[in-house]
Structures are given as C-alpha cells and as structure tokens.
C-alpha cells in the first residue's frame, strides 16, 4: 500500500524562525526604563531563545504583571503567545495572540501576531479541533491580504497550504505550495514546501509533476533528513505511471537504509513492483524476507500475506501455504485472507478435503468478516472439486449469492450454481439460477457466460425457440466476444434440430473460417453436411462431411459424421461406398453410441440392394444387440418387409406384430399395419388382413402406397368371396392411379372377379384392356384367351 501523508517524517512538521531575535534586538522604547526592567526583559528573551519555553512563559507573565504599562507589552505578549504555542498550550497561545491583535491593531509586529495566531489555530486543528482549520484560513487570509509582500509571506503561504491540505483541498494546497517554491527558491522552508507539494501532487495522481518536484528536492537538499523518504516517494511516482522496473530501483535504495524508519515499507513497495512485473517468485521472496530483516516491524503479517499471494501466483503452492500457515496459526487479523489463499493453493494441489477442513474452521471463528462471502465461495469451490459432493456445491453457491447479494463475489457464485447444475444435467435448476442472475446482476461481466448457460439449458430441455432466441441475443449484443463463433455454432445446431436447413447454412458458413479448434471446425462442417443431405445436395454434403472428418478424425462427432456421409452416399446411389464408410465406423469406434444406427443402416443398404438374407441377418442382429435402441421400430419394419420379400409371411407378421404392440404411438405403426395386412393376406387370414389394410387407408396415404393397399384389400375380399367389394377396390385403384406399376395384375384380378360375378362381357373388356395396355406383362397372353 502507498505511504500516506500522515506517516511522513516528524521533521517535516512546520518549523521556522521565531521573530524573537528581531524583537529583542529592535529599538528600545522611547522612555528610559529602569535597568531592572531591561534585565527582566532580557532574561525572558534568553529563556525563549534557549528553547526553555515553559520557563520563558513564567518569565514573560512575570514581566507583564510587573510592567503592565511598559511600551514593549505588545511584544512581550506576542512572545508569550509564541512560547505558549511552542509548549503546546494552544488555548493560552490563542488568548495571548488575539490580545495583541485586538488591543494593538497598528503595531509593527501585527504581521507576526497574525502568523502565529494562524499557526496556533492550525495546531489546534491538528490536535483534533478541526473547526480551527477554518479559523486559521481566515487569519492567514487576513495576513496575506494586509501584507501581500510582507516579510512572513513564505510562512503564511506554507501554513495556508497546510490548512487546505488538512481540509482536503489538495488542489489549492498544491497551488500555494507551488507559489512558495516558485517565488522563494532560497527560503529555508523550500525543502518542507517541496516535500509537501510533491505529496499533494502524488495524492492527486499527478505522478509526473510529483516526480519532477521530488527530483528538485533531491537536487537542492540531498542531505536533508527527508531525502531518503523523498527517494522512496520518487519510486511511488514511477509506480503510478507504470514504470515498475525504475520504481523498484528507488524503493530498493530506500529499503537498503537501516537508519530509515520506513525501510520495511520501502521493501514492500519494491516487492509490489516485482509483482506488477509478474516476477511473482522474486516478489514473494522479497516479501518473505521482511520478517527476517525487520524483526519488530508492524508490517510482518501484511508482508507474509503478500508473500503467500505471490507464491500462489508463482504456482509455488507449498511455499504459499508455508508462509501463510504462520498467519493462520497466529489467528491474527489477516486470518480470513490467509485462509483464502491457502485454500486456493490446496485446491491447486488437488486437496479439496484439506481445503474444506481449513475453510470450515476459519468460518467458525471469522463469521461476519468482510471476507466471509469469499471464504464461503472458496468452500463451495472445494466442494465442487470433490466429485461425490459436487451436487451439494450447487446449493452452497446459491446460498452465497442469496446471503451476500451485494458482495462482489455474488455474481460469480450464482454463475457457478448455474454452470454446475448444467454440468450435472440439472437443466431446470441451471435455467432457474441463470434467471436469478439476470435479475440481480444484469451489469456483471459474467452476463454473456450466464446467457450462454441459459441458452444451453433451454436447448437440453428441448425449448428450442428459447435457446435459439438466447443465442441470437448473445451474438447481437456481444459481436466482438471471443465466443461468438461458438454461439453461432450452437445456434446452427438448434436450427439443424428444427430442420431449418437453409438457415443452418446461413448461420454456419460465415464462421467456419473463424473457428480455431478442430472440434468446432468438425462440428460446423458436420452441420453443413447434414443440412445439405436433407436439401438433397449430395455432392456438396459429401465434401462438407469429408472436411469434418479431416478436421477431427477421432473427434466426438466423427462417428456421426461417418453416418451422415454414408447416408449421403446411399441417397446418391453409391451403396458400396456407403457400406465401406459404415464398416470403417464400426471398426474405428467399437464403443460408439451410434453402433445401433450403423448396423441398422447396413441392413437397410442390403435391403435396398435386394440382398434380403443379409438384410434379415442385419436387422435381427441389431434388434438382438440393441433392444432399447430408438431404431428398433425402424429395424422391425425393415425386417418385416424383408421377410415378406422372402415369402416368410409368418415371420414377417411377427415383426409387424411386435412393432404394433410395443410402439403403438410410433409413426411407423401405419406402415406396420399395411405390412401385416399383406402378410395376413398371403397367409389367408383375410378378415384380420382387411382390418389392417383399412386401418392403414384411414391414415390417408397417397400414391403407390395407397394403390398397393387397395390392391391387397381387393385380394382379401376375393379370398372371402366378396367379389363385388373386390371389384370396387380394384376400380377405385385404377381410377385414382391409372399408371400404377401393378395395373396389369389389378386388371387381371378385376377381370376374374367380374367373371365370378357372371359378368363375362365386362370381364372380357378388362382382359382386353390388360392385353392392349400391358403387352409385355406375363399376364397379357392369358388375357387374350378370355
């Protein structure tokens, strides 16, 4: 800490020549005093000259009592007041000096009387009667007004400046000191005035001006008793303008003087310079040396505390704890702060249990300390660093913020409550703490970080619109924040989840080049690639996904990127390459959470290639290995259709049965009803088949799916001998979908149904239509015979 004016050396107190000598050497009074009177006067004067002020007081009082009408009574009264002042009998000095001024307003020594009256009033102010400073100002202003070029102008300016300084008007004090040193460079008060001017300038933050003043002092008075303190203060002026290396040299010079009463302070300021230069180890050693060099210093505890802090910053945790342990053992005033830094060192050393014990002991003794909030935050941090207690830390952090809402650590505590809750998956709690942070700490520097926590918590709670809004708010309010690319990336992830693929491109493309971490780059290209796949821009998608894999081939999303790449290749028609990519995924990431999906897609690729045995094997393996997978419904529907293709109708029905029973709300149930209806038709289970098909048609399918369902429905009705209903189904199919790929089979079944209904002409017409419109059908030749 800086040296204050009140700690300055005692020899800098105002002291200047008495008027005594000029008074007693002046002209004798006009009348002829007796020799005895003159002798009495001289004896009083000699006592005053010899600094025997209390004896001089008695002598002057005796002189005045014996000679009340003597012409030198004013001078004697003045000298009596001076002796009272010098013997610190200020009230009596005040009375004597006021008597001279009031009874002898035109006396030649009025200026001296005013000066000493002002000095007395100033002394009373310094003794605790602060109202006397204002009285001193009035007296000295009278002196300066009545004697603008008087013999006591330097002293008057000095005292007047001292009054302003004492009253807190350092700006005006500096002006008066400056006038004194400018107008009276040869006055004996010059060293004191330069010292006082430099201190005022230093405390006003005018460090360069103060430095120049101190330089002038040292040049003019290098051997002055204040010179070593001024050297130290010269260091303060350099410290104030950030020239720490130069400042350290001045402080070192002062600290080296064993005869300097503030050498311990100078050493601490030298160490502070090293700390500012981030030479923490050297600073710590210097602080720690104070206790060894200055055994009786009052600054030992302060120095040890600073040493502990600097050792901490130098990452010498053992040394930090060692020096701080002395303070902790003494249980002195610095116990809370020493505990804080010692606990932080323990946390750095991975000893949270010891930190908790230390903090709890100190808190039991130092409750109510200004550092209680910080210590409780440290306790929450130590609890956080203990994995089994981490959940408890959320409450501890929140309690700090609640109990100390106006403390500087309150925002950090609430931030950590939200962050820890998010980290532990308690997203609702994270959002709640974030909202409380917004209410109480809206101007905190941590605000963007907490908004990001709230956004992520909302995202995890599937409150996508809220998460999107918060990330957009972050990007808009903090465009120069270093995390903007990350926020944009999360925003892109949300848009991707919302299937707003074009907006994903708009959000991600501008930031790809600004992302520095391979993980972030990989994620960005992944989002671009996935969006492009959904937009059916497969070549661009493949390029993006390959960029993702190059950026971070073993990263957290590499397996997902491989799946998207395989999907793009599949949809582009390159099934062989897609299978290769999925095989690489399975081999490279044997513990991937996406193995169920990867194996499902291998089965799908086999199905799409018509390799039904491989598809069946793949679906069944996936269902066996990952029975809880979200892809179970997809695998069941695929397995059912693969079994149908292999004419394994009973097994197909089982697959569809399981899907319908276990996942009744799944979107694939309608497809499963259609598949099961088809299998049941092949198994001659016509009534339940019709029930399934009609349930499927109730979902209002369109295109080929609807036509296929109507075709199967017609077959089931024929199987039940309900030809008229079958005819209705077939005719509805052909009317709605005349280009249906199975139109030849539909016409064939329709014709036979009509024939069964004894409608030969209409049947013949349909057979003829089949042969004419589908000449390449395997049914065309037979149709020509009907």
Image (cartoon, rainbow, N blue to C red):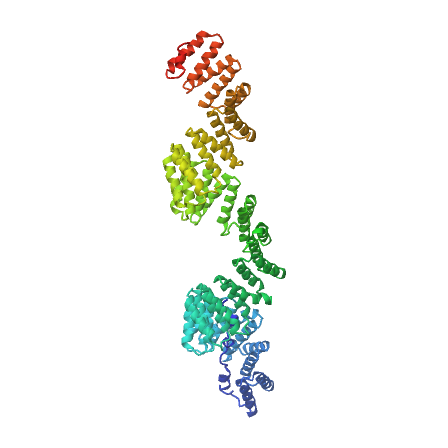
- The residue nearer to you, when weighing 478 against 413, is 413
Location of residue 438 with respect to 500 vertically, above or below = below
Q: Residue 68's quadrant in the figure?
A: bottom right
Q: Up-down: is 281 above or below 489?
A: below
Whether 484 is drawn above or below 172: the answer is above
Given residues 45 and 491, the one toward you in this image is: 491
In this image, 76 relative to 249: left or right? Answer: right
Observer able to see residue 4: no
* Residue 436 screen position, x and y as percent: 56, 47
The location of residue 596, given as percent across then percent down, is: 49, 37
x 44%, y 7%: residue: 761
Farthest bottom residue in view: 35
Residue 540 in the image: state x and y as whole percent: 37, 37
**How far from the left and from the top, in percent, is residue 65?**
60, 85
Picture layout, residue 575 above or below residue 140: above
Q: How many marks?
A: 0
Q: Residue furthest right?
A: 364
Q: Quadrant of the C terminus?
A: top left
The answer to whether one can see residue 646 in this image is yes
Seen from the viewer's position, the closer of residues 286 and 477 is: 286
């Amino acid at each position: 800490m800086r040296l204050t004016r009140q700690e300055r050396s005692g020899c800098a107190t105002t002291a200047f020549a008495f008027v005594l000598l000029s008074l007693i050497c002046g002209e004798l009074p006009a009348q002829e005093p007796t020799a005895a009177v003159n002798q009495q006067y001289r004896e009083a004067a000699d006592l005053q000259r010899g600094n025997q002020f209390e004896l001089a007081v008695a002598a002057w009082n005796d002189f005045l009592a014996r000679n009340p009408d003597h012409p030198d009574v004013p001078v004697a009264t003045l000298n009596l007041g001076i002796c009272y002042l010098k013997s610190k009998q200020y009230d009596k000095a005040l009375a004597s000096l006021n008597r001279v001024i009031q009874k002898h307003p035109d006396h030649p020594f009025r200026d001296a009387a005013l000066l000493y009256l002002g000095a007395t009033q100033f002394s009373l102010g310094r003794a605790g009667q602060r109202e006397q400073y204002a009285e001193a100002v009035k007296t000295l202003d009278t002196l300066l007004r009545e004697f603008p070029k008087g013999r006591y102008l330097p002293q008057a300016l000095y005292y007047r400046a001292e009054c302003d300084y004492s009253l807190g008007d350092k700006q005006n004090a500096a002006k008066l000191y400056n006038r004194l040193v400018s107008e009276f460079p040869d006055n004996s008060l010059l060293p004191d005035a330069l010292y006082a001017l430099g201190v005022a300038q230093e405390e006003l933050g005018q460090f360069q001006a103060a430095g120049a003043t101190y330089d002038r002092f040292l040049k003019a008075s290098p051997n002055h008793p204040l010179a070593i303190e001024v050297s130290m203060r010269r260091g303060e002026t350099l410290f104030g303008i950030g020239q720490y290396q130069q400042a350290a040299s001045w402080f070192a010079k002062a600290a080296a003087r064993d005869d300097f009463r503030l050498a311990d302070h100078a050493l601490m300021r030298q160490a502070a310079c090293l700390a500012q230069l981030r030479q923490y180890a050297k600073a710590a050693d210097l602080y720690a040396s104070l206790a060894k060099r200055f055994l009786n210093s009052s600054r030992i505890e302060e120095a040890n505390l600073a040493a502990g802090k600097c050792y901490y910053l130098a990452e010498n945790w053992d040394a930090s704890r060692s020096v701080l342990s002395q303070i902790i053992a003494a249980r002195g005033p610095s116990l809370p702060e020493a505990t804080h830094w010692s606990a932080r060192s323990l946390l750095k050393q991975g000893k949270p249990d010891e930190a908790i014990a230390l903090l709890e002991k100190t808190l039991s003794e130092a409750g109510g300390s200004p550092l209680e909030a910080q210590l409780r935050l440290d306790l929450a941090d130590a609890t956080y660093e203990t994995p089994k207690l981490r959940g408890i830390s959320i409450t501890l952090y929140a309690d700090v913020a609640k109990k100390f809402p106006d403390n500087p650590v309150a925002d950090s505590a609430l931030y950590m409550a939200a962050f820890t809750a998010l980290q532990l998956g308690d997203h609702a709690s994270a959002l709640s703490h974030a909202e409380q942070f917004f209410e109480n700490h809206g101007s905190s520097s941590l605000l963007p970080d907490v908004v990001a926590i709230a956004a992520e918590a909302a995202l995890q709670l599937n409150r996508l619109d809220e998460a999107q809004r918060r990330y957009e708010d972050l990007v808009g309010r903090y465009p120069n924040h270093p995390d903007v690319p990350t926020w944009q990336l999360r925003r892109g992830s949300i848009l991707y989840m919302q299937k707003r693929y074009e907006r994903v491109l708009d959000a991600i493309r501008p930031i790809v080049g600004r992302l520095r971490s391979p993980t972030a780059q990989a994620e960005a290209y992944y989002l671009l690639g996935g969006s492009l796949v959904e937009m059916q821009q497969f070549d661009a998608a493949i390029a993006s996904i390959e960029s993702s894999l190059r950026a971070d081939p073993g990263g957290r999303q590499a397996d997902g990127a491989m799946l998207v790449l395989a999907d793009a290749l599949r949809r582009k028609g390159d099934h062989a390459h897609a299978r290769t990519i999925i095989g690489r995924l399975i081999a490279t990431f044997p513990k991937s959470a996406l193995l169920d999906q990867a194996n499902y897609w291998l089965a799908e690729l086999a199905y799409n290639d018509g390799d039904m045995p491989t598809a069946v094997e793949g679906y069944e393996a996936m269902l066996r290995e990952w029975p809880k997978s979200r892809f179970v419904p997809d695998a069941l529907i695929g397995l059912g259709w693969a079994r149908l293709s292999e004419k394994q109708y009973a097994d197909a029905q089982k697959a569809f049965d399981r899907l319908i029973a276990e996942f009744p709300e799944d979107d694939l149930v309608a497809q499963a009803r259609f598949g099961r209806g088809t299998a049941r038709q092949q198994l001659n289970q016509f009534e339940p088949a019709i029930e399934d098909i009609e349930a499927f048609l109730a979902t209002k399918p369109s295109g080929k799916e609807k036509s296929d369902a109507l075709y199967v429905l017609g077959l089931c009705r024929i199987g039940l001998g309900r030809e008229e209903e079958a005819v209705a189904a077939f005719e509805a199919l052909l009317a709605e979908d005349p280009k249906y790929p199975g139109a030849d089979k539909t016409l064939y079944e329709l014709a036979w149904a009509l024939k069964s209904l004894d409608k030969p002409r209409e049947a013949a017409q349909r057979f003829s239509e089949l042969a004419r419109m589908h000449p390449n059908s395997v049914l065309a030749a037979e149709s020509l015979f009907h």
